[in-house]
Every structure is written in C-alpha cells, then in structure tokens.
Amino acid sequence: MLNAAQLALFAFGDDKVELLPHDTAGTPEGAATAAQVAIGDGARIILGPLLAGSVQAVAPAARAANVPVVAFSSDRTVAGYGVYVMGFLPSAEADRVVRHAINKGRKRFGILAPNTPYGATVVEAVQAAAVSAGAVVTKIRRYDPASDDFTAVVRDVADYTVRHQALLHQRTELKAKDDEASKRALERLASLQSIGDLPFDALMVADGGKRLQEIAALLPFFDVDPGIVQIIGTGQWDVAGLGAEPALVNALYAAPDPAARRDFSKQFKDTYGEDAPRLATLAYDAMALAAVLARGEQGPDFSAASLTSASGFFGRDGIFR
C-alpha cells in the first residue's frame, strides 16, 4: 500500500506535498504512537491505518489536533468526527448482490459466515436487504474462522442429515412395496444422497481465500447444487482465479469493475515487479486525493466539505466518495 501511495505521489504531487510513512507495527498501540509522531512532524492529513482497532486508536490524537484521518478500514462504525473510511464496505457489497439475486427470482437466503465482526456485518446486511425486498433469510450458520474443517457447518446449513434420512426412509418404503413402479422409483433414487428441498434458493458465503475454496468444495458433496442454488458472495471474492473452483462457476459477487483498475495494476507491476494487492488502489486513491487537495490556491484544503464532496472523485476502482 505504501508502494501504491508513492505511485500516486509521483503522479499527482508537487513540491507542496510530502509523504511521511510511519510504521504502526500492526497494533493499535503502534498506530496511536505513529499518529502522535506524525502530528508532531506537522502532518495535515493522515492516510491509514488499515484495521478498525488501529483506526480507533489513532482517532483521539487526530481529533484533538484537528487532523483528518482517511482510514482504509472496511468497518464503517469507526468513521465520524474527522475520521473517514475509505474501504470496500461489506454492507454495501452484500446489499448489492442480494438485491441482484432477488431481481433474478431468488426469495429464500441462507448465510454461511465467519464468527467475526465482518461476518456479523454481512449477516445484518443480507437480512436487511432481503426483508426490504420481500425475501426472507431462512438459515444462518456461523463458523470459527480459525477452523481447518468446515464439514460440520456446511452439512448443517444444507440440512443434509434430515434430507439424507428422508432418502433412506423412502428407500425403505419402496423396497417394502416390491411392485414395478416402486422398483423404478428405487432405481431413480440409487444415485442420490438426499431428497427434499433445501431451505434456501440462494446462499451467501461471506468469506474469501482458502476458506471460501474449502467451503465451496464441500457444497456439492452435501447436495447443494450450484445449478439450483445461487451462490453469492462479497468483495472478498474479488481475486484472480476464483473460477477454478467448479462450485463457484456462475456464482455472483459485488465488486468494482476490474477493468477500471487495469491500468493501475499494470503500472504497479511494471514499477515494482509484482502484482498489486487488492487493497493497493485504496492507498493510491487516498494519496492522489491528498495531493490534489494540497494544491489549492489558498493552500491545502483538507476540510470536511472538500473531503466529502458530493460529486465524488475518480479513482482506480471508479468513482469514490
């Protein structure tokens, strides 16, 4: 993210702009110290930190010095009173993809989410979007993100035990009848592992990376057919190669159009020899915004009115506000 900010500095900055990196050491305490040092060095605006706890730690000193903070957290609850959130908000992503699924005819939603603040935010957003559009959330299951086995939670959300028992019961009944129609029905059931409708026709998987891949691979195993159930997700899915997992082919997620950041991604790789992390565009846009606002005729203008311009700003992922 620092590399991305430096790209923006050279693209938009002039001799009125100086970028002063301060290491937070990845802790709220480190972030608070870094903010105090930055303010002592004369910082007029703080870009970052990344995590919600660190943003909360930075806020008191920044507010006391009247220095605005443009943070990269995706937790909107840390914003306010001079602290601005410039992250991809999971609530907005969940709302968008749920409403799209409802427009495609889905009415009953299941949710698989990590037992984290992020997961709780997505659950709340899916519930709100579903209710406001006349749909319903029928099943919610949370799991420990530190787990290395998601079999039980996927089995549970799919009602697999009940549906498998229903299959065994029906097979037993058909075998007892011993007529031609029952035999043909029994043959049709031979290749099935369960029967009965799932409690949802769309399933939100509020996770990404390796956990998403492991959960997705388990869905067909427990008779959650992606051809019948619409699998949906958030911006955590916004990574290359997601379609390599068969269960996620034709799944839906909400994120900025990747075409918007194509030039940035190429510039970053040409400059640094590696692919840009997904969050790097946030740092680039924040630095570009600060550099542009620093060039005002009356001097730097980091006022609330400037930072919250209703028309927004053009960034590497499109328009942002």
Image (cartoon, rainbow, N blue to C red):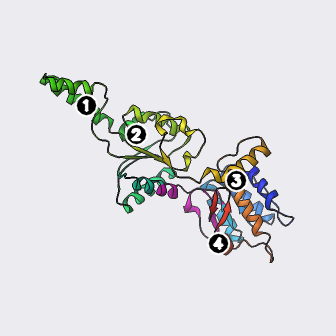
For marks 2 and 3, the one nearer the N-term is 3
- Spot the residue most to the right: 15
Answer whether labels 4 and 2 touch (C-beta < 8 Å): no
Q: In this rendered view, identify the residue nearer to me: 313 or 124.
A: 313
Kind of residue at badge 2 = Gly
Q: What amino acid is at disc 3?
A: Gly
Q: Earlier in the sequence, mark 2 or mark 1?
A: 1
Horizontal and vertical percent position of residue 159:
32, 39
Of the numbered discs 4 and 2, the one sitting upstream in the chain is 2
Per the rendered image, the range of residues in magenta is 71-96
Mark 2 closeness class: few <14, some 14–19, many ≥20 residues within 10 Å:
few
Inspect the magenta stretch and tell me whether residue 80 lies in it. Answer: yes
Q: Secondary structure at mark 1?
A: helix
Residue picked out by circle 1: 167
Tell me the distance, in whole angstroms, between the alpha carbons under discs 1 and 4: 59 Å
Q: Spatial distance from mark 4 to mark 2, Cα to Cα?
A: 44 Å
Name the residue that disc number 2 marks: 227
